[in-house]
Image (tube, helix red, strand yellow):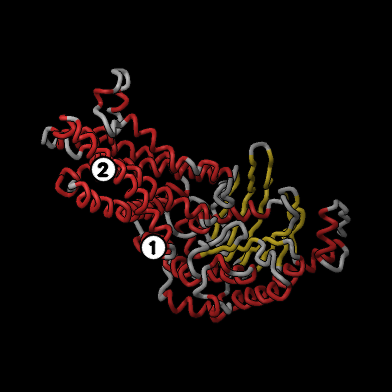
Amino acid sequence: MSTAATHGFRRGIGWHRVGAMLLRHWYLLTSSWPRLLEMVYWPALTLISWGFLQNYISSNAGFFAKAGGTLIGAVILWDILFRGQLGFSISFLEEMWSRNLGNLMMSPLTPFEFLLSLMIMSVIRLAIGIVPMMVMAAVFFDFNMLGLGFALVAFFCNLILTSWAVGIVVSGLVVRNGMGAESLAWTLVFILLPLACVYYPVSVLPAWLQPVAWLLPPTYVFEGMRALMIDKVFRADLMVEALAINAVLFVVAIFAFIALLNSARGAGKLIQSGE
Amino acid sequence: MHNASAAIEVDRLVKIYKATPAVNDVSFSISRQSVTALLGGNGAGKTTTIGMIMGLIRPTSGAVRVLGHSMPDESAHVLGRMNFESPYVDMPMRLTVRQNLTVFGRLYAVQDVRSRIDQLATELELKEFLDRPSGNLSAGQKTRVSLAKALVNQPELLLLDEPTASLDPDAADWIRRHLEDYRKKRGATILLASHNMLEVERLCDRVIILKRGRIEDDDTPSGIRARYNRTTLEEVFLDVARGRVEKAS
């Protein structure tokens, strides 16, 4: 596959170009307070709803009283996965909405630098939404996410890697198929919600579906979270397995993006991005 | 065989979308510091040809070399030395003009971006709306800003797709004058696609006429007028578009 896209991946990283892209998104974020508010609004609303539900259930069921914080923990970790992917995809979609992709693809910015800037932006966007969420969890529901310590770092790294892999594939699909594929940015990640067993253990799934669940890195994270909060055990083995699958998914996503970008070049989609 | 003095070499270029040929066996070479127009009606293949030269469209077959490098495989060697303006792309509308130019200046590794923006603002008369969001500008102002983006890295090669489309005659004339000045000062090569015959006659020392993806003619504006026995390129354009071709040999 010898094309401009792969050539870009072979070059070293031009950090000034990555910095330019971050600056572009920083200008955008700071130009609109409703955008910033929206990034905080939904995570806060989700946390409050689930927090009260957790309070209600734990006061009425012995198991949940013992597993205090499991639901809130799951909500916050799911939001890391969902908002991480959304942060990546929306930063990418901003280029499509503003018809700026041709300018970028024609500039010295390489595809890898472009993806790298989107990954960094996803973390920044995620932080804007998730930090207030964690503060609210501590203040209103007595749940200190930072108390998870190193486990939180392992959970976060695995979830953000998965979110980037999904975001990269979604971006490739939008480049190739135009804005008709835009809704994937909001919907694709939800396929993980039932399969990755966010709110219940893998054992709840039918036996034939469990191997599918174990192919998904977030499943290991949510099982690990429950092991930590219910059994007070940090399952490092689950985190290592998740990391290994994530590495494979990430590489596959990058290759898929290159293939879709090349296909878009062949179809003339980079110069006229639209429906 | 590569021509080192050529800014652009296009060799037997073909682009087929599904079963429709958009560009069909096109070859030409453009020397450095020249201004060349790709002329043709809608669907003649101008934008597709420029897209392949920029590396944004992959040819079905054939080869493109820009500033001595094969496109798109060696695009990394030349993308910083060229730039483009097209009505098919915009800059982020919520960002101010200054912010947009800062971002593109950094992408192109421009030394002292602030000074370069000040220089462009003076030359292209952007100062009064430099801190206004790009989406709030008039068509003429937007074209000037797009041109400023295209010139931010002082490119050796400038590709322009209908640079004065949707501008009033005064604004269009203003843009053409600036392009002429830039070419003289920088010694740049300019390739433009246009429908505007006046623009082509004024700016270009060579015209390549495309029709249905093929080269119909290729000469200086005066050479083409003489060959078709016409006084303006507009008359030639109509002859070619309507199939009334009676070339003098």
Residue A184 visible to an observer of this rendering: yes
Relative horizontal placement of residue A176, taking residue B139 as reference (left or right): left
Residue at disc 2, secondary structure: helix
Q: Residue at x 55, y 71 (%)?
A: B148
Q: Residue furthest top?
A: A207
**Mark 1 or mark 2, which is nearer the start of the sequence?**
1
* Residue B111 % position (x, y): 41, 74
- In this view, the residue in front, A9 or B70, is A9
Q: Residues within 10 Å of mark 1 (few under 14, many from 20)?
A: some
Q: Residue at x 67, y 76 (%)?
A: B174
Occupied quadrant, residue A34? bottom left
Which residue has dot 1 on it? A26
- In this view, the residue in front, A224 or B65, is A224
Q: Are marks 2 and 1 in contact (CB under 8 Å)?
A: no
Which residue has dot 2 on it? A51
Q: Residue at x 16, y 33 (%)?
A: A227
Q: CA distance from mark 2 to mark 1?
A: 32 Å
Relative horizontal placement of residue B48, taking residue A153 as reference (left or right): right
